[in-house]
Image: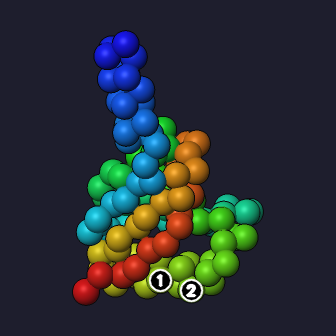
């Protein structure tokens, strides 16, 4: 019984069940796709199969502001902090992000 409870605890607290976060990182590439913006960061943190790959979807309520911030960060070389939605595939969907000083 203890082994079952321990295994259940490990499954419930594994990184795959927690939204990703990069901490202070820089954007290395930014690609415009038909229904999302795909970008890559120096540090890993996402739950996707490629943990430094992120998707900002067009239907995100703050798409315009976040896309502007990502472009500004890439152009200026300033760091960003990206937090995911725990929606994982090849990349994690972005929940929020901000530019660091």
Query: Which of the two residues, 54 or 29, is positioned nearer the viewer here?
Result: 54
| 81 sits left or right of 97 in the view | left
Question: Would you identify the image quadrant in which residue 26 lies?
Answer: bottom left
Counting from the top left corner in percent of width and height, residue 61 is at 67, 78
| 87 sits left or right of 7 in the view | right
Q: Callout 2: 10 Å neighbours few (<14), some, many (20+)?
A: few
Q: From this view, report whether residue 15 is shown above or below residue 92.
A: above
Question: Would you identify the image quadrant in which residue 47 lies?
Answer: top left
Q: Callout 1: 10 Å neighbours few (<14), some, many (20+)?
A: some
Q: Residue at x 53, y 64 (%)?
A: 94
Q: Element type at marker 1?
A: helix
Is residue 51 at all visible to an observer of this figure?
yes
| 30 sits left or right of 25 in the view | right
Is residue 71 at all visible to an observer of this figure?
no
Q: Residue at x 70, y 70 (%)?
A: 58
Q: Looking at the rendered structure, which numbered label has been put on residue 65?
A: 2
Query: Which of the two residues, 86 or 100, is positioned nearer the viewer here?
Result: 86
| 56 sits left or right of 35 in the view | left
Q: Name the residue beneath numbered marker 1.
A: 69
Query: Which of the two residues, 90 or 94, is positioned nearer the viewer here?
Result: 94
Is there a contact, CB below 8 Å, between mark 2 and mark 1?
yes
Counting from the top left corner in percent of width and height, residue 37 is at 60, 65
Q: From this view, report whether residue 2 is shown above or below residue 51.
A: above
Q: State the quadrant of the C terminus.
A: bottom left
Counting from the top left corner in percent of width and height, residue 54 is at 50, 57
Query: Which of the two residues, 28 or 63, is positioned nearer the viewer here?
Result: 63
Q: Residue at x 33, y 23 (%)?
A: 6
Q: Element type at marker 2?
A: helix
Label 2, label 1: how far apart the Cα atoms are: 6 Å
In the image, farthest residue toward the front: 1
Q: Residue at x 33, y 51 (%)?
A: 44
Number of numbered labels in the structure image: 2
């Amino acid at each position: 019984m203890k082994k079952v409870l321990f295994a259940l605890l490990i499954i419930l607290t594994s990184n795959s069940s927690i939204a990703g976060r990069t901490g202070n990182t820089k954007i290395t590439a930014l690609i415009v796709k038909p229904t999302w913006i795909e970008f890559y960061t120096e540090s890993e943190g996402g739950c996707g199969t490629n943990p430094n790959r992120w998707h900002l979807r067009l239907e995100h309520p703050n798409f315009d502001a976040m896309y502007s911030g990502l472009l500004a960060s890439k152009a200026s070389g300033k760091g960003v902090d990206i937090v995911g939605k725990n929606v994982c595939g090849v990349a994690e969907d972005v929940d929020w992000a901000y530019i660091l000083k």
